[in-house]
Structure formats: structure tokens, C-alpha cells
């Protein structure tokens, strides 16, 4: 049974406008379980940034900048931390939203990052852009089922002074850029988009759900000593090979046991691991998988063996 924390109106907003802000999506206990992991991963950087003020790297008249330092504290799942942060991108409520949004009962998590930003480390103020350039080699699909759902999960309060994402709903951007939604609008279009942009500011536990064809931009952190902890998770329908990042097995040296040993079969299926009852599972493949992951719960798979 799906765990839903969204409404039909949330899905309609995502489909029609390209984005929806889901305030308080995670409860305080779920946020509290993950927050120590962010401090473990980025706490040293938090201490160093305590007294820093905002910086502006833009040249005169420049709309926004993209710098490598904007992604300085940015890592791919799985993380060298507890199972809490490693499983949060596979939260059943996120899976339920992705399934409803994409009209399918079978989705795949193809990307997840932890991301920390600190005031004064760089200028985080970006130009408006769409994300499809690094999610697909084609373009965003007109068919909703072939699109993607991207989640930005907040683990600290994200105000405009803490670099809240800004975006423009499709109903407003279409009159500026047309339905084509190019990756990088012209300078005049950038200014027009800024005049109608909306803020994704919200409290810890909130989730910003958006598509790879919605115009958005990062904004600068201006709060003295400010920081922002977020985690991203991106889903597409199973079998949609046009969308991807890097294959999860590429990161086989990372601590996958946090996920394999604690995730449900439904969560593991979102990573491409066959569900119980699939023809992949035999006595031999179960035994070999147990050898690779001794803490894995093999019982649901063994119970539905076909041979």
C-alpha cells in the first residue's frame, strides 16, 4: 500500500506548473534522524563558515554565475554516514508521489545527492536554467509518463537569506520563453523571468518537487554564518532509458550496506534490484547475494522462489 503525503492537487500542480512546494512533508522526527548525518559530513565546514558574510562574484550587469564552488559540498548516495540519510531518498512517501506523478506503479531512483551550502563560500546566485541538460541526452518529454520527478528535501530551514531555490511556473514562463523552454534564456528573458519568479523558501522537512523542464535558479546565501542542508532525489518510470545519471553499480566501493541491509523490497526495487518472485531469484542467486551482503533480509525473496 502506498504511503501518500500529497494530494491530487499537488500532482496537478506538478504536472501543470512544473513544480510544487510540499511544506512539512517530513515530520520532525524524520528530519532529526538525518540532521546528525549532515553534521557528520559537513560539520567542519559549518564551523569554518560561522562568521562569514555573503560574497558577490558577478560582473557588472551579469544575471547570475555558475561556479564549481557551488557544488563543493555535494556527494552522491550512498553516504559515509548512517542508514537514516542513506534511506531518506527512498522514503515511501516520495516513491508514492513519483508513481502518481508519472502514471506508473514502477519507478526508479536514478540520482540522489547530499548538498551543503555556506554563506561566503561562493556566490550561489545563478541564472535561470532547466536541468534536462544533465539528466538526458534528448529533451524533456511531452508525455508525462516519460518525464522525471526531482525532489529537493530540506533538512534546515531554507529562507531567502539561506539560498532558497527560485522558480517560475510554466503558466508564467510560457509567455516569456514559449513552450520550448530552452536551457538558458536570453538576457532579456532572464530579466523577465526574475520579475515573476517565486520562492521555494520553507521550513525543515519541506520538499520542493519539480521537473527538468521548469526554469529555476539557485540564490545566494546572505545570512551571516548561514548554512543550508538539502538532499536531492530524482525518479523516472522503470524502463525509461532516456533519463539517467551514473549507474549505481559504478559506486560499488561506497557503503551500500546501509541501504541493502535496511531497505524494503519495494525500496530496493527503485534501485533496480528485482522484487521477490522475479525470475532472477533462484536458490543460487539468493545465496550469492547473501554472501555479498550478509545483513540483507533474504526471507521475502526466498519465500517466493519459483524453483
Image (cartoon, rainbow, N blue to C red):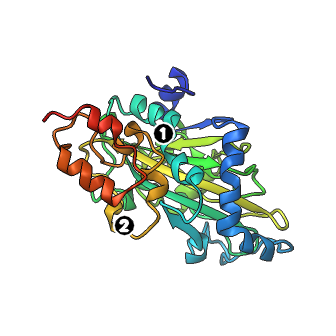
The local secondary structure at tag 1 comes to loop
Q: Residue at x 55, y 53 (%)?
A: 83
Pointer 1 or 2: first along the chain = 1
Q: Is residue 207 visible?
A: yes
Q: Residue at x 42, y 32 (%)?
A: 101
State the image coordinates of residue 144 (x, y, percent, origin top left).
34, 35
Quarter of the N terminus within the rendering = top left
State the image coordinates of residue 99 (x, y, percent, origin top left).
39, 32
Residue in front for this viewpoint, 51 or 254? 254
State the image coordinates of residue 54 (x, y, percent, origin top left).
78, 71
The vertical placement of 23 against 37, above or below, is: above
Q: Residue at x 32, y 53 (%)?
A: 290
Dot 1 corresponds to which residue?
A: 18
The vertical placement of 101 against 174, above or below, is: above
The local secondary structure at tag 2 comes to loop
Q: Is residue 65 visible?
A: no
Dot 2 corresponds to which residue?
A: 252
Amino acid at each position: 500500500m502506498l504511503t501518500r503525503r500529497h494530494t491530487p492537487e499537488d500532482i496537478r500542480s506538478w504536472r501543470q506548473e512544473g513544480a510544487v512546494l510540499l511544506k512539512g512533508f517530513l515530520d520532525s522526527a524524520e528530519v532529526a534522524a538525518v540532521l546528525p548525518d549532515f553534521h557528520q559530513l559537513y560539520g567542519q565546514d559549518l564551523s569554518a563558515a560561522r562568521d562569514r558574510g555573503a560574497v558577490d562574484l558577478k560582473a557588472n550587469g551579469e544575471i547570475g554565475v555558475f561556479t564549481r564552488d557551488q557544488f563543493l559540498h555535494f556527494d552522491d548516495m550512498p553516504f559515509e554516514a548512517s542508514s537514516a540519510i542513506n534511506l531518506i531518498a527512498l522514503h515511501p512517501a516520495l516513491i508514492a508521489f513519483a508513481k502518481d506523478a508519472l502514471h506508473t506503479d514502477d519507478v526508479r531512483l536514478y540520482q540522489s545527492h547530499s548538498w551543503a551550502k555556506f554563506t561566503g563560500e561562493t556566490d550561489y546566485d545563478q541564472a535561470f536554467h532547466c536541468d534536462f541538460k544533465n539528466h538526458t541526452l534528448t529533451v524533456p518529454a511531452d508525455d508525462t509518463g516519460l518525464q522525471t520527478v526531482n525532489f529537493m528535501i530540506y533538512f534546515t530551514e531554507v529562507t531567502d537569506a539561506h539560498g532558497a531555490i527560485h522558480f517560475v511556473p510554466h503558466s508564467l514562463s510560457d509567455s516569456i520563453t514559449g513552450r520550448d523552454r530552452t536551457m538558458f534564456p536570453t538576457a532579456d528573458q532572464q530579466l523577465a523571468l526574475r520579475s515573476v519568479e517565486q520562492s521555494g523558501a520553507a521550513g525543515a522537512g519541506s520538499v520542493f518537487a519539480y521537473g527538468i523542464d521548469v526554469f529555476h535558479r539557485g540564490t545566494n546565501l546572505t545570512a551571516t554564518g548561514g548554512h543550508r542542508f538539502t538532499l536531492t532525489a530524482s525518479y523516472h518510470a522503470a524502463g525509461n532509458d532516456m533519463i539517467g545519471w551514473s549507474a549505481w553499480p559504478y559506486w560499488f566501493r561506497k557503503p551500500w550496506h546501509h541501504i541493502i541491509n535496511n531497505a524494503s523490497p519495494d525500496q530496493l526495487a527503485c534501485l533496480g534490484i528485482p522484487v521477490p518472485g522475479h525470475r532472477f531469484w533462484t536458490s543460487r542467486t539468493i545465496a550469492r547475494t547473501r554472501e555479498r551482503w550478509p545483513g540483507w533480509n533474504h526471507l521475502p525473496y526466498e519465500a517466493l522462489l519459483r524453483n
